[in-house]
Image (cartoon, rainbow, N blue to C red):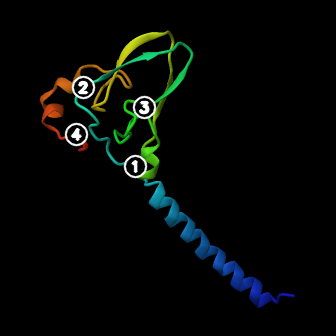
């Protein structure tokens, strides 16, 4: 049987546990997301199937470009993939420079001097 002192000590420990959990969460889920990196300097053409849901890599770290492989989570970027559903079956160019203004589709931004001067794997 536990006394009142044991219960109070346990209660105080719970506060420290909360701090430990919050610091763990902060390490894995940073409040300020890391910037996307240039995966490639040219878009990738893919055939999207009508009605199928896709997850486009936002962080630029995926090894399965232009789609997400979960690298954003393991590298603790704070970024999440862009989930989208294809409206029709067609071939499209998906952005891999991660600077497009029409994600996930390429808008030609990769041709800009800013992207072409950047190194693959570096943020813009």
- Horizontal side of 83 relative to 116 (left or right) equals right
Residue 67 numbered tag: 3
Tell me which label, 4 or 3, sits earlier in the chain.
3
At x 42%, y 43%, the residue is 79
Percent of width and height locating residue 97: 27, 31
Tell me which label, 1 or 4, sits earlier in the chain.
1
Binning the other alpha carbons within 10 Å of mark 2 as few (below 14), some (14 to 19) or many (20 upward) gives some
Determine whether label 4 and label 2 are within 8 Å by CB.
no
For the residue labelled by badge 4, is the local secondary structure a helix, a strand or a loop?
Answer: loop
The quarter of the rendered structure image containing the C terminus is top left
Q: Which residue is labeled 1 in the image?
A: 77
Determine whether label 4 and label 3 are within 8 Å by CB.
no
The quarter of the rendered structure image containing the N terminus is bottom right
Tell me which label, 3 or 2, sits earlier in the chain.
2
Q: Which residue is labeled 4 in the image?
A: 120
Determine whether label 1 and label 4 are within 8 Å by CB.
no
- Horizontal side of 114 relative to 81 (left or right) equals left
Tell me which label, 3 or 1, sits earlier in the chain.
3
Tell me which label, 1 or 2, sits earlier in the chain.
2
Percent of width and height locating residue 62: 38, 39
Rendered position, 50 above or below 36: above
Q: Which residue is labeled 2 in the image?
A: 42
The one of 120 and 13 positioned closer to us in this rendering: 120
At x 39%, y 12%, the residue is 91
Percent of width and height locating residue 69: 45, 39
For the residue labelled by badge 1, is the local secondary structure a helix, a strand or a loop?
Answer: loop
> How many numbered callouts?
4
Which of pointers 1 and 2 indicates the residue nearer the eye? 2
Percent of width and height locating residue 119: 18, 41
* Distance between mark 4 and mark 3 Cα atoms: 17 Å
């Amino acid at each position: 049987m536990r006394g009142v002192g044991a219960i109070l000590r346990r209660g105080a420990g719970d506060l420290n546990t909360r701090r430990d959990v919050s610091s763990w969460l902060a390490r894995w889920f940073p409040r300020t997301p890391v910037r996307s990196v240039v995966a490639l300097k040219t878009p990738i053409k893919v055939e999207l199937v009508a009605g199928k849901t896709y997850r486009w890599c936002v962080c630029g770290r995926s090894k399965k470009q232009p789609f997400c492989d979960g690298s954003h989570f393991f590298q603790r970027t704070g970024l999440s993939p862009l989930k989208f559903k294809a409206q029709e079956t067609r071939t499209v160019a998906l952005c891999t420079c991660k600077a497009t203004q029409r994600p996930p589709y390429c808008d030609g931004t990769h041709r800009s001097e800013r992207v072409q001067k950047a190194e693959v794997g570096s943020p813009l």
